[in-house]
Image (cartoon, rainbow, N blue to C red):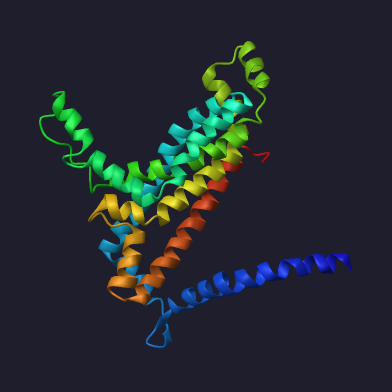
Amino acid sequence: MKKKYIYLLLLPGVLFLTLFMIVPLALTFAGTFSDAGSFSFQGYLNFFQNAYFMEILWTTIRVSLLTTVFCIVLGFPAAYYISGLRARTKALMLLLAVFPLLVSPVVRSFSWMIILGRNGLLNQFLLGVGIRSEPLEIMYTPIAVNIGLVHLFLPLMIVTLVGILENVDRNLLEAAESLGASKVTIFRKILLPLCVPGLMIGCTLVFVGSFTAYTTPALLGGNQRVISTFLYQNAVTLNDWHVASIVSVIMIAVTVLFILIINKIALKLNPRG
């Protein structure tokens, strides 16, 4: 009897998710196969046969993957350092790491526009010290989008990795070093497999967040279209909800595919889970 009452506690949450997430997703998915009232795959065929649409998709995937890689490269050393600090210092460093999350993405994007613009702080510095004779054209390029997205999602990678690294026994690493293992071997054979759960979660959060981000690519990318701005254009500007639905389903499919790939990689790095 008690188990039945426990299941009843799940009912409000299940109903909420069903009504406001599962049903809308199912209707959106079903609508993508409708063409003049009949079942058809023509919408998907038109998308994948259109070079412009595919360029937007590949640009978004490339930007999201690069953002994930940069977050790993920048976040892992920072997380390793923070995880070895004392409790009070660690709390302070984590607070500093997550502080950017308290600032609106719009504000952060505008700050990067001030820094990376043609007459921005970066170009003023490079021209002032004589490193460049002409301003760098960074704004409204995929590089600017990458910079903004790394700034946006790096705290998530750091926090996720700290939670894993602080549970790694440092004596294990010291023992391996005392037995003659190199730093590279220690990292590859011991530290990396132990960090796989944190890396998997962090990569998923960063990739999915970058793939679906709208504000930062819209402000820093300019005419560089990504899938989220393309979805907004079709839904709001062009009022083409059929194409917008197809784009949204493709976005969901790509994120699910990425999660499956990450799980496969995680199993190879750490077969014991």
In the picture as drawn, the residue positioned furthest to the left comes out as 133
- Callout count: 0
Rendered residue at 22%/34% (across/down): 122
From the viewer's perspective, tell me whether residue 222 is left or right of residue 10. left
Image quadrant for the C terminus? top right
Rendered residue at 54%/38% (across/down): 159
Where does residue 4 sit, x and y in percent of width and height?
83, 69
Where does residue 259 sit, x and y in percent of width and height?
53, 52
Rendered residue at 58%/32% (across/down): 91
Where does residue 170 sit, x and y in percent of width and height?
64, 21
In the picture as drawn, the residue positioned furthest to the right comes out as 1
Image quadrant for the N terminus? bottom right
Is residue 7 at least partly visible in the picture? yes
Say above or below: 10 vs 195.
below
Which corner quadrant of the image does residue 148 belong to? top left
Which corner quadrant of the image does residue 174 belong to? top right
For the residue pair 219 and 142, the one nearer the viewer reads as 219
Is residue 59 at least partly visible in the picture? no
Where does residue 54 sit, x and y in percent of width and height?
31, 60
Rendered residue at 30%/67% (across/down): 233
From the viewer's perspective, tell me whether residue 236 is left or right of residue 132. right
For the residue pair 152 and 246, the one nearer the viewer reads as 152
Say above or below: 52 vs 153.
below
For the residue pair 218 and 38, the one nearer the viewer reads as 218
From the viewer's perspective, tell me whether residue 118 is left or right of residue 25. left
